[in-house]
Image (cartoon, grey):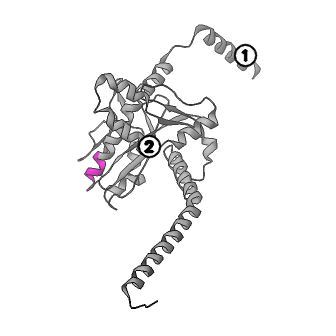
Amino acid sequence: MDTNKNSYTIIYSIVMVVVVAAVLAFVSLSLKDKQNENISNEKKQYLLASVGLGADANFDSVIKSAVVVDGNGMVVNKADSDVAKSEAFAISTSEQNTKIKELATLAPEAQEAAKAELRLPVFIADLPDGSQAYIFSAYGAGLWGPIWGWVSLKTDFSTIVGVKFDHQGETPGLGAEIATPKFSNQFIGKEIFANGEFTSVAIVKGGVKEGSTNQVDAISGGTITSKALEASILNWFEAYLPYIKSLQALAATPMPLENEATEVAETAENGENK
């Protein structure tokens, strides 16, 4: 073949493109399992971080159970704890975020059916001090790309145990600060309810008001990302609200007299046996 002809150049280019594409496809497929494993491990670390634990904590010992709920507060997954945890873990929060945003565009009569289609993960953590925490997801759009995170609540379903946020492309030193402990530690002890009313958490510029229980300082120079994160938390917790209120109602329900009597008797018996 005459290498000086245009046809040679064209054929050579086509062959090289095909060969390079095939090599890249092979490498991508070969690494897919490892990439998925890394994504899974990172997600586990985020969940642990949201309750104040490091990567050295055993995920399965801390996160022993999970549920998947819809926008009407109904639990929709299997009762088996391992299956439930797998189902909750596999949920794409980006896909659910699209559905949450679409809710606001629907007529009231169509919203209930749409809420029933939501699949929202909730993880239940058994903490080293013997307490429990419920971990809720959040997802939204930052300045340059997606932002996401996990917010854990005490069993009063108002007080924040901890949070963990991350992003895809926020500006280093500005919006990217949402992923730092300096920012996330502000959320510890804040509350998403005030006097029984849902308030979510406000990320405010110019300093937190004295005595505020639901405000944290915005990132200096990262106001757009801060407000985007505030909106993400609000939108997702509004979606979770029917489920959270059902848990609050259950926690406030008086113990049946027969159960109370049994507990008193067991307490007395334990005291005598000491």
- The percent coordinates of residue 46 (x first, y second) are 50, 49
Q: Is residue 168 left or right of residue 220?
A: right
Q: Residues within 10 Å of mark 2 (few under 14, many from 20)?
A: some
Q: Is residue 39 magenta?
A: no
Mark 2 falls on what kind of element? helix
User: Which quadrant holds the C terminus?
Assistant: top right
- The percent coordinates of residue 51 (x first, y second) are 51, 43
Q: Please give the label number shown on residue 219.
A: none
Q: Is residue 225 magenta?
A: yes
Given residues 51 and 123, the one toward you in this image is 123
- Tell me where the magenta segment starts and ends, as one range: 221-227
**Residue under pointer 2:** 93
Given residues 59 and 143, the one toward you in this image is 143
| 242 in relation to 147, above or below | above
**Kind of residue at disc 2:** Thr
- The percent coordinates of residue 112 (x first, y second) are 37, 24
Residue pictured at 44% horizontal, 81% vertical: 12
Q: Please give the label number shown on residue 269.
A: 1
